[in-house]
Image (tube, rainbow, N blue to C red):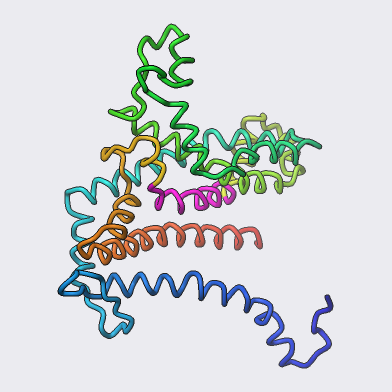
Amino acid sequence: MSTPAGGTVGQRRWYYPALAMPGIVWLLLLFILPFYAIAAVAFGTRDQIFALPIPAWNPLEWQFETFSETAGELFASGGLQAQFTRTVLYVGISVVLCLLVGYPVAYYIARYGGRLKILLLTLMIAPFWMSYLMRMLAWVNLLSLKPEDPGLVNRLLLLTPFVHDPIAWNSGAVSHMTVILGLVYGYIPFFILPLYAALDRIDRSQLEASRDMGASPASTFWRVTLPLSKQGILAGAVIITLPMFGDYYTPNLLTASPENTMIGNAIDLALQGGQGTQPKGAGLTLLLSAFIAALMIYYLVSVSRAAKEAQR
């Protein structure tokens, strides 16, 4: 496709905006408008008879009483604060585990995959072509604690000299680990792929220059490879952090315990519940979006700084 380099100034001015227009319309219809509808519900009122939410589409008519109550409940000691704190801990630990597990995998494929890179990447993501729900239900069976069937994982652990009784994966302190492992399993491929892309783009001559200057392989990794792959780590972390914060089905499926509910469970319960709880759920959605937006801003600032340093 030829570019309008030879066209008039007006043609060149509108050429690339016209190419971007389908994406802009898509974002307006499927992101901006639904998000505005959530804000209209969060700052709206309730029907006096049936307590149904009445969206306030005019920003001049927005009321902030319900939103202020929701924010106060989130930051005060209680159920919502515990769910939000638990969510932050779950997501933080899951991202660290994804880094510890995913970095060696991405590093091996990028450095030693050779002609098998495509095959290795395909094998890694092949199980994730299946529905997330089906994969979590498979884990429910693997971690089963029925009297007649303790589950495959427990049966394997009972063969070792370290475990003598079946582990209750869905109760107590172990249930927190179960949810975290479920999050890691569900999202780790989306962490590995951008990290692999970052590692694969590192110029081998930089690594060879480090070795020529007398640096050991370990020193080369810590001083060259790891800093150059920082943007891949941040990109992978952002990609998996966003859906993790809104996840509510993983704790529901793996433990179904109130001790493991996340902030996504509170939002789902409020939006699906009755008695006019939808504005509360919409307000929680806005607060969670603001928190995630702060993380996104940090990522964008980091990327901008890295791009400026690369240009120097």
Looking at the image, which residue is at 18% across and 64% down? 69
Residue 98, can we see it?
no
Magenta stretch prevailing secondary structure = helix
Report the side of 55 relative to 179 (left or right): left
Q: Is residue 82 left or right of residue 103?
A: left
Is 243 within the magenta? yes
Residue 34 on image: x %, y %: 43, 71
Q: Is residue 247 above or below residue 44?
A: above
Question: Magenta segment range?
Answer: 231-248
- Rendered position, 199 above or below 11: above
Q: Does any portion of residue 16 appear in the rendered image?
A: yes
Residue at 46% x, 15% y is 155
Q: Nearer the viewer, residue 16 or 140?
A: 140
Residue 154, how many percent across, how many down?
43, 18
| Pick the front one: 274 or 171 | 274
Q: How many marks?
A: 0
Q: Residue at x 65, y 58 (%)?
A: 310
Give the quadrant of residue 4.
Answer: bottom right
133 on left or right of 174: right
Residue found at the far top of this picture:
161
**Taking 297 as reference, is 175 above or below it?**
above
Quarter of the image with the N terminus is bottom right
Q: Give coordinates of residue 19: x percent, y percent.
A: 68, 78
Q: Nearer the viewer, residue 194 or 209?
A: 194
**Is 62 above or below relative to 291?**
below
Which is nearer the eye, 145 or 244?
A: 145
Q: Position of residue 283 (x, y in %)?
A: 29, 65
Instruction: Report the residue at 22% width, 75% height from top.
Output: 45
| Quarter of the figure with the C terminus | bottom right
Q: Is residue 154 magenta?
A: no
